[in-house]
Amino acid sequence: MQTSRRRFFGRTGLLAGSAIGFPQIIRSAEPEAPLPERRPQHIIHLVADGMCWSTFTMGNAFSQLRRQRGLRWFELLHREEATVTAVDMRSLNSLVTDSAAASSSWGSGSRVVNGALNVLPDGRELRPLMPLFKEAGWKRGLVTTTEITHATPAGFAATISSRGDAEDIAQQYLDRSIEVLLGGGRKFFEATKRKDKVDLHRAFRDRGYTVCQDAAALADAPNDRPWLGTFAAGHLPFTLDRDHDAKLQRKVPSLADMTRRALDKLGRETHFLLQVEGGRVDHACHGCDIAAAVRELVAFDEAIEVCLEFQQRFPDTLLVLTTDHGTGGPALNGLGTAYGSSSPLFANLLRAKRSFEAFGDEIPKEPAAEAVRRLLADATGYEVPETELKRFLEFLEGRWKPLFSGMNGRAMQLGQLLANHYGVSWTSGAHTIDYAPLVALGPGAALFRGFQKNTDVFRHYTALAGIDYRNPELPLLAECAPAAADVEPPCLPA
């Protein structure tokens, strides 16, 4: 760990890719760090999507309030055998990345423009990790709380110019025979919902897959067959909402549940690569909902604990914990005399019962003050003062707009209103520029020492698996704007 700190800023990827021209596919060179004598047989890549450093800090503080202990991820920072560093996650066309470009950088070793999945702007398709690892004899899995076709899982497996083409991504998963697929996104597999009317659930069954649509089916899924689990039409419900709804708990597995079952199955194999994503940290932060965000981070931490238990039983497992970008820029502020109000305000997060997503549609287009006051009190525990409620209702009625357009949304202003209750304010509902924290533990962790470039992850994984392959790369683009529809929205609809 001391070595990592000394070398933390020893090398950066900020100027990488400045070579002139479009290079052809070349074979990968030896990694800068020597390969370990003992290489991992299993690689688990864990992503808390959209987690800023401040979100991580607040998640640890919330965990201490709720569980009387901090995050296991935070505890790993103190382990001598862990490699602790940060990663430059910029995309090909912007200092601020989206999830598609971020995951593609890990998945292919090349930076792409925001909105693309393993496709360069000139149309060349890149070969991501999942097909490459299949050729090397490794089993593969994707587990997420988002739609299974969403950008982060897809970045390891799919090749498509627009992240929004979820139906095509679902088909690519079938074509590439990924052994474990667990998350949401059922609508992209159903004949009645797909534009081409193809019944992908049936197609997966015809290929020998067990198709699961609730927690009980996942618990009973046979380990000798591949799995497709889609537990919601869209994204899985927020943990905050699931924790307060017994029906959802019976129907929808937690991230820890899905991770445990994936390891039950894949752990029988000689080699496997598994990506686990806590994707709704990002969605909560897009919606400026800190109560939902910290609970998603705790749920992600519970999945980390499952992976650490697996690593104890199988020490030849490499764990890599990271995020892809920040979202929303949340921060607990110093409030009150000598900042004495900050801690008790933050503790109000324990009183939240529903996410903004769950109750946002219940705020009518022409809201009545008393109805909104009761709704917020029930969902968050906040008795909104009259003056604050009046200003919020005036915004909903279109009578004023924020000076910064990045805060011009119902969810953003709801987050600002609740900042008076939680002490946590926001910079926007969009992604932010953050170096991503990364912790690696297990055989091969030393390769991650020193400040990393996002594309290094691909090179480390392929080197550790004995895969000699490198995708083409392009110089950074100063100007290359993707279509607005191809990039994540600034916030969730309220």
Image (tube, grey):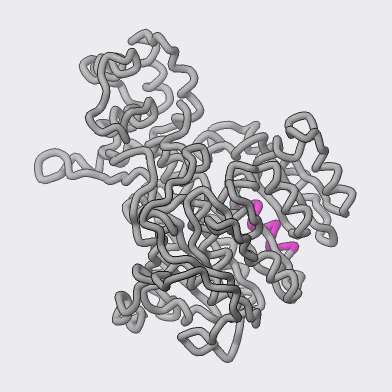
Residue located 76% across and 70% down the image: 268
The answer to whether residue 461 is seen in the rendering is yes
Q: Quadrant of the C terminus?
A: top left
Q: Position of residue 316 (x, y in %)?
A: 62, 79
Q: Is residue 486 left or right of residue 430?
A: right
Residue located 43% across and 66% down the image: 475
Q: Is residue 104 left or right of residue 18?
A: right
Q: Which residues are magenta?
A: 256-265
Q: Main secondary structure of the magenta part?
A: helix
Which is nearer the eye, 13 or 199?
Answer: 13
In the rendered image, residue 248 lying in the magenta stretch gets the answer no
Residue located 55% across and 59% down the image: 120
- Looking at the image, the residue that sits furthest to the right is 206
Q: Position of residue 190 (x, y in %)?
A: 77, 35
Task: Using the image, determine if residue 34 lies above or below residue 237.
Answer: below
Which is nearer the eye, 282 or 154?
Answer: 154
